Structures are given as C-alpha cells and as structure tokens.
Amino acid sequence: MLGLIGEAISLRSFSSLWYWIAVAVFWIAATGRVLGLSYGAVARAQAGGAARVQFDMMAQYAAHIWVARWQKWQVVWVAAAAAGLVSLSMLAFSYGIELAQALWFLAMPYAILLALQLRLALHILDKDLRDDGLIQVIYRFRIISQLMGFAFVFTTSGFAFLHLLIHGYFR
C-alpha cells in the first residue's frame, strides 16, 4: 500500500500522474478564456441584444488592458520571458533534467499563447472590431488556441514516451 502511495506522488515528471493532471488543467484553463473573456460570454453575445453590447464593451476593455500592460512593462516581460525560457531550455535539453523538460513543455506554449493573445488585443484595437467581426475573431482565436493545445499535448506525450522508453522507466 505504501509503495502505491509513493508511486502516486512521485516527483518524476513524465511518469507522474500529477504532471499529466497539471497538463490537462493547464490547457483547459489556457483555452477556456480569450483575453479573459469566457466562451459563455461569446455564446451569449452571439444571441444578440444587450449581451452583445456588453460583450463588445468587455472585449474592448480587455484589449485595452492587455495593450496598456504591454506598453508599460514590455521590456520587463520580454527580458523575463527570454531569461526564463532560455534558462529552462538549457536545464532541460543541455543538462537533461526531467523536471525542467516537463516545465518547458508548459512554459513555451504558454509564452506563445500569451504573445498571440497580445497580438489579438492589438488587432481588436487597431481594427476597432465590434459585433459579428469581434465575435468571429475571438471564436477563431479560441479554435486556434485549442488546436495549439492539442498539438503541444501530443508533442509532450510523445517526448515523454520517448524519454521514459530511453531511460527505462517502464520496467
């Protein structure tokens, strides 16, 4: 019984159930909202009426917040992201640390997703999107982020399988 509990809370990343639960929760949370707006708000806006006007205002506000934060902290964000991702990449792939590899497969797609959300916010403000155009762009972004999540989960699981196969964790 103690051995089963010890395996359930193993600190090895790719062979740990907890890591895969974290990956699933991460991608559900990351693709569930676009610019902080839930998909339920998009669905209500598609119905029209007051919900659409409210959604337009919320989306414009969220885009303004993203762009304002970017303009204020862009040097810090780029420096921190570059330092963190390069350090994690070095630990993961130069030194072969499994925990760093597992974290890299979460941090890299999240950085890409954040950059794409910033690009979406800039696009919304630049084109002054409203009504159906705004809903269509946000819906398309959600589909793209879900496809990206699927691709990264597939890549992560493939890398994890090869890692576990090479290092003999399936004995």
Image (cartoon, grey):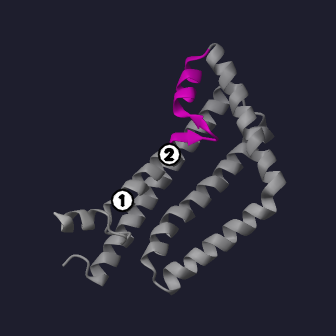
Tag 1: residue type?
Trp
Q: Is 38 part of what is drawn in magenta?
A: yes
Front: mark 2 or 1: 1
Quadrant of image for the C terminus:
bottom left
Q: Which image quadrant is residue 4 in?
A: bottom left
Residue 22 placement (x, y as % from top left): 42, 56
> Marks 2 and 1, Cα distance to the nearest angstrom?
16 Å
Q: Is 131 part of what is drawn in magenta?
A: no
Residue for point 55% across, 22% down = 44
Circle on res. 54: none
Residue for point 59% across, 22% down = 45
Q: Is residue 169 left or right of residue 126?
A: left
Residue 122 placement (x, y as % from top left): 75, 46
Q: Residue tagged by mark 2?
A: 29
Q: Do the residues labelled 2 and 1 touch (CB within 8 Å)?
A: no
Q: Is mark 1 on a helix, strand or loop?
A: helix
Against 116, residue 137 (above or below) is above
Residue 51 placement (x, y as % from top left): 62, 18
- Furthest residue toward right: 72
Q: Which image quadrant is residue 46 in?
A: top right
Residue range of the region highlighted in magenta in the rendering: 32-48
In primary-sequence order, the first of circles 2 and 1 is: 1
Q: Is residue 6 left or right of residue 57?
A: left
Quadrant of image for the N terminus:
bottom left
Question: Along the line of sight, which residue is nearer the eye, 135 or 15?
Answer: 15
Circle on res. 18: 1
Q: Is mark 2 on a helix, strand or loop?
A: helix
Q: Residues within 10 Å of mark 2 (few under 14, many from 20)?
A: few
